[in-house]
Image (cartoon, rainbow, N blue to C red):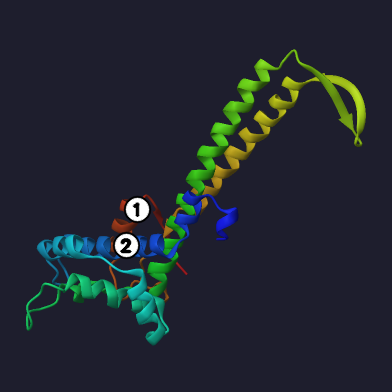
């Protein structure tokens, strides 16, 4: 995002800080899902510990990525350091459960969809507000005469309220399109390498997506 052309709220959504925060939430939710199933060995107490201690530092992630040349490995390494920081030497590290059975695209693609949902929510809210303003102004200016224009020149007279009314109806159609777009980007996939679920139970995907307000892909690719 180019800062001078971007509203702070929208720019934040596509910042690395927000992306990493979403990655963290996805990983924590996946741990909680595994603990809920009770199949791989992680306990609910360990999942709670991971949620309480999970964190990251963008600059530290960047430094690790400069060595690994892999953004997900860099992030998970940094997050694991925070989770395990207070664990005594020789004891099992809770971070061993993080990213269990997952692949990088589970994290990246699901997070991107969540970012698109966040961004679309801003657009939907703004479109709805602008439409209401145009509707209000259409009634306020319904008797205000103005020059109609066609082919770039003066035409028949009309009212300024008619212009606002036309914009209001156009924005209503835009709102429908944005709501439809939101529905079609609100998907997630936590299905393991090449999407076969051979390394992870589909319940994890359902759990993570439900808590993020996403729909799980019936057959991820």
Q: 110 or 218, which lies in front? A: 110
In front of the other: 22 or 113: 22
Picture layout, residue 70 above or below residue 144: below
Which residue is the site of mark 1?
A: 212
**Residue depicted at 72% across the width and 28% down the height:** 166
Judge by depth and name the residue closer to the eye, 169 or 82: 82
**Residue 76 location, x and y as percent?**
30, 74
Q: Are marks 1 and 2 in contact (CB under 8 Å)?
A: yes
Q: How many marks?
A: 2
| Badge 2 density bin: few <14, some 14–19, many ≥20, Cα 10 Å | many
Q: Secondary structure at mark 2?
A: helix
Residue 154 figure quarter: top right
Quarter of the figure with residue 79: bottom left
- Seen in the image, is 28 located left or right of residue 38? right
Query: Is there any visible trace of residue 18 in the rendered image?
Result: yes
In the rendered structure, find residue 155 and report the number of the disc placed on it.
none
C-alpha distance separating marks 1 and 2: 8 Å
Residue furthest to the front in view is 4
173 sits left or right of 57 in the view: right
Q: Which residue is mark 2?
A: 26
Q: Residue 147: percent from the left, percent from the top?
A: 86, 23
- SS for tag 1? helix
Left or right: where 92 falls relative to 27: left
Compare marks 1 and 2 and give the one earlier in the sequence.
2
Residue beneath the point at 45% across and 55% down: 12
Q: Nearer the viewer, residue 201 or 47?
A: 47
Q: Is residue 101 visible?
A: no
Residue 145 position within the rendered picture, expressed as x and y whole percent measured from the top left = 80, 16
């Amino acid at each position: 995002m180019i800062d001078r052309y971007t509203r702070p709220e929208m720019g934040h959504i596509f910042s690395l800080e927000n992306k990493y925060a979403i990655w963290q939430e996805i990983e924590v939710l996946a741990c909680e899902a595994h603990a809920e199933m009770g199949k791989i060995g992680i306990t609910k107490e360990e999942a709670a510990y991971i949620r309480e201690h999970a964190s990251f530092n963008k600059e530290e992630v960047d430094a690790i990525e400069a060595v690994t040349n892999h953004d997900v490995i860099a992030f998970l390494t940094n997050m694991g350091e925070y989770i395990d920081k207070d664990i005594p030497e020789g004891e099992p590290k809770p971070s061993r459960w993080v990213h269990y059975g997952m692949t990088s695209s589970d994290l990246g693609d699901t997070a991107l969809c969540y970012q698109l949902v966040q961004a679309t929510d801003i657009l939907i809210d703004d479109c709805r507000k602008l439409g209401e303003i145009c509707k209000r102004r259409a009634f306020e200016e319904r008797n205000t005469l103005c020059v109609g224009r066609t082919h770039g020149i003066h035409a028949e007279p009309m009212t300024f309220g008619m212009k606002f009314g036309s914009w209001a109806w156009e924005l209503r159609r835009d709102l429908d399109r944005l709501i439809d777009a939101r529905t079609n980007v609100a998907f997630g996939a936590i299905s393991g390498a090449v999407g076969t679920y051979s390394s992870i139970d589909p319940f994890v995907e359902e759990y993570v997506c439900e808590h993020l307000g996403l729909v799980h892909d019936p057959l991820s690719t």
